[in-house]
Structures are given as structure tokens and as C-alpha cells.
Amino acid sequence: MTNKGAFAMSMMKTILAGALAVALLGCAGKDFVRPDSATLKNGETTYAQATERFGKPFSEGSATKNDKTVKSISYAYASLGGRPAKEGVVPARAMALYFYNDTLVGYEFLSSWAEDSTDFDESKVNQIVKGSTTRAEVVQLFGKPSGYAIHPMIKAATGEAAVYVYMEVSGGPFTGRKTFRKQLLVTFDDKGIVTDVDFASTGTK
């Protein structure tokens, strides 16, 4: 994993996991639907437009990314009464949006609900070849991305990264709670060719 990828994923992991953890503890938060990539556009959607659509954020924050101050907002929801994608997993969803100068520069969504699960097959990561694999081939391997990011969320001034992220919490107070999280960040150049690949996972299933 490159340093630039590790930093981006660390920022995303902290924000999403933090919001989701709070929601899971209280089985709370305000429900929302997976955003449509056609209506959330990096470089165009404003902070005001995003909050008007999704409402008051679950949490807010900021961080320095590639020497730029990026604002983040997150949303999270969990319910023990929902239908999870996998038996024994708490159904939950979370979303984080990132803004530079109040303009969207990245977003990601994760879910362990049956109807919109963002789980993906990490065993296929080694099939991605930098300088060769195309955007279409990545989608064929992993399905619809959980989100996208552009500069300054990624180091390159042009191109963008597709984000795949999934997190699940299983078990309970008597059996012990287990948390598993994985995230894949695939960066493309202007021609849609992969230039960087970063994958990380933590916890146990």
C-alpha cells in the first residue's frame, strides 16, 4: 500500500467507523438511502445541496489532506430489527461526504443490510493490474463502487478513485462482539486505466 493511499483510507476509516460505532451502540441514527452517483457529483455538489438532501449530519469534522483542509460530514443508522445481508450481523449503514471549499471531493457508503449491502470479494484484488486494468474491468470484478474521490482526497490532480468499503458487526454481550472492516481504493487516470490500488482489512468475521 502506498503512503498516499494509506492516508486516504485512514481518514475514511476513522470517520465512517466512528459514526457507525455510535449508531451500533445505540441502534440509532436517522435512516437514509444509498446515494445515487448521478446526483452526488464530485467537483459540483455543494455542502449546502448535500445537507439539504440528507439533513443534519450525524457528525462533522475536518482534516488536512494533501495540504488542503477537507471538511467531512457523516450519517449512520443501525437497527436490530432490520434484515442483514448475513445471518448474525447487525444491519447498519453509514455514509461520509468530503468537501473542499464547500464543494464535494469524495463520498463513500457502506451497508450490511440485505437490500443494499456493499460487501465485495476481496480475493479478486490481486487481479487488478496497475497500468493495464480498466475502470470497466474493475466494476466487472467488484460491482458498483461504494463511492468516488478526487483531489485533494487523492494526490493526483486529475483522475479519480473508486471506493469499495464494507463493515460488519456480529455477536452480542454474551457471545462477544466481533467487527470486520475492509476497504479497497482504486485510482484511475483520465483514460480510465488503473494507476494505484490500495486494500486493507481489520478485525475478524
Image: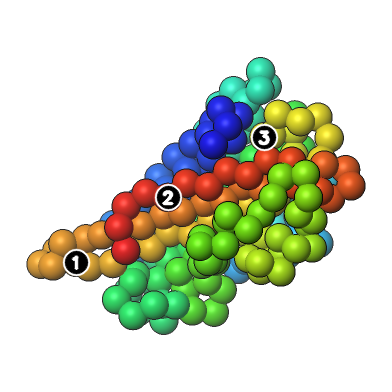
Residue position for label 1: 172
Residue 81 horizontal/vertical position (percent): 35, 79
Rounded to the nearest angstrom, the CA distance separating label 3 from label 1 is 35 Å
The residue closer to the viewer here, 142 or 54, is 142
Task: Relative to 10, say whether 75 is above or below.
Answer: below
> What residue is shown at x 49% (from left), y 36% (from top)?
10
> What residue is shown at x 81% (from left), y 29% (from top)?
157
Rounded to the nearest angstrom, the CA distance separating label 2 from label 3 is 20 Å
Q: What's the residue type where badge 3 is placed?
A: Met
Local SS, label 1 = loop
Local SS, label 3 = loop
Residue position for label 3: 153
Q: Residue furthest right?
A: 191
> What residue is shown at x 67% (from left), y 34% (from top)?
153
Judged left or right of residue 199, residue 55 is right
Residue 114 horizontal/vertical position (percent): 49, 79
Residue position for label 2: 201
Local SS, label 2 = strand
The residue closer to the viewer here, 54 or 106, is 106
- Contact between marks 2 and 1 (CB within 8 A): the answer is no
Judged left or right of residue 164, residue 160 is right
Q: Which mark is residue 85?
A: none
Rounded to the nearest angstrom, the CA distance separating label 2 from label 1 is 22 Å
Task: Relative to 31, say whether 16 is above or below.
Answer: above
Indicate the quadrant containing the N terminus: top left, top right, bottom left or bottom right: top right
